Amino acid sequence: MFKLLMSSVLSLTTLLAAVTFATPAAAQEPIVLRTGSFAPPNSVFTRYWVSFKQNIETQSKGAIRVELNTNDPNEANLLSNVRRGRVECVGASLQGSSTVLPEIAVLQQPYLFSSFAQVDAAYDKGLADNFRRLFAARGLAMLQFVEVGFTHTYSTMPIRTPADVKGQKLRATQSRASQAWVRATGGEAVVLPIAEAVPGLQTGLIKGGESGVIVYGGLIAKAAPHYTLTAHAFDSGALLCNKEWYDKLKPEHQAIVTAAWDARAQARDARADNEKFLADAASRGITVRKPSAAELEAWRAVGKRAADELLAQMSPEARQIRDEIARDIAGVR
């Protein structure tokens, strides 16, 4: 009886020891967060993706391991992968995001904003919460907006007014807003992925297009050295995660992932980088043109036509968001 009891005790001790040694190893297995995005080398986006990784891994004390991929310009592929759970989080432009959530195109309505003060007034008053709710219904958890900046017009030839692009083929994105803008200028919209913009310019398939400073400077400028500061739209991106994956995280890990991209600091740095690029553009062989007051009025008239077309196509919810933005920026210059 004594031998049987001792044998049972030894067996139990062995089992407890095995559990004791096995449990920490299992607990230490990190959660993997694979990302996907396209960030021009040495851009503000590249720097903040690195910070995103460092912030998550440091604050989670290694419980989450981030695998960065910032070299995929195929947004259709990125968005498909995150929705299917092949990657956990991606950075997508508003243009790309609009293929999943058409309502987000309202943020690119021509001349919706005319200053950074208006941008800040709108984005600081719960705009992200509206779109988090809409993205959630499509299986995506939106973390933050990512500032790109005002969108301008690039070309292989000088452009002063919309009359200069009438009949010309211009690159448009997948977004309704982009296509409406090009049509309103009198140009012919050629929808191309960003990776095909430079080959299109080099072969003469397109004569120009629209882009924020970061992508223009990092990718397009050499092929289209004329940049007209039409400032006809304000561009952001969105950090999107697979909602099923995000919802399984512990609350403290959700908070870490959500806050890992410092949106305010990134916006400040993007604005500074954009200004520096424009100031140095001449030394790089780029002609930057700021429209006169009369020329700007011609561009605004084009924007009004494009905005009317865009709003007519939008859902009631998108128009409601547009009305909220109008109230938030009323009186802000």
Image: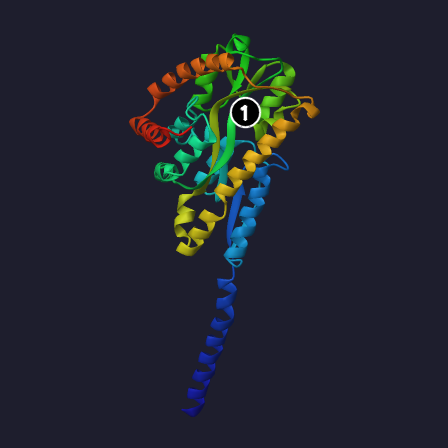
Q: Quadrant of the N terminus?
A: bottom left
Q: Which residue sits at x=39%, y=54%?
A: 251
Q: Secondary structure at mark 1?
A: strand
User: Relative to 237, is 319 on the left or the right?
Assistant: left
Residue, disc 1: 211
Which one is nearer the viewer's eye here, 203 or 152?
152
- Using the image, determine if residue 231 lies above or below residue 52: above
Which one is nearer the viewer's eye here, 286 or 45?
286
Q: Is residue 38 visible?
A: no
Q: Where does residue 201 sit, x and y in percent of width and height? A: 62, 18
Q: Is residue 85 visible?
A: yes
Q: Quadrant of the C terminus?
A: top left
Which one is nearer the viewer's eye here, 205 or 152?
152
Q: Where does residue 131 sit, x and y in percent of width and height? A: 37, 36
Mark 1 burial class by Cα count in 10 Å: few <14, some 14-19, many 20+: many
Q: Which residue sits at x=54%, y=16%?
A: 291
User: Relative to 11, is 310 on the left or the right?
Assistant: left
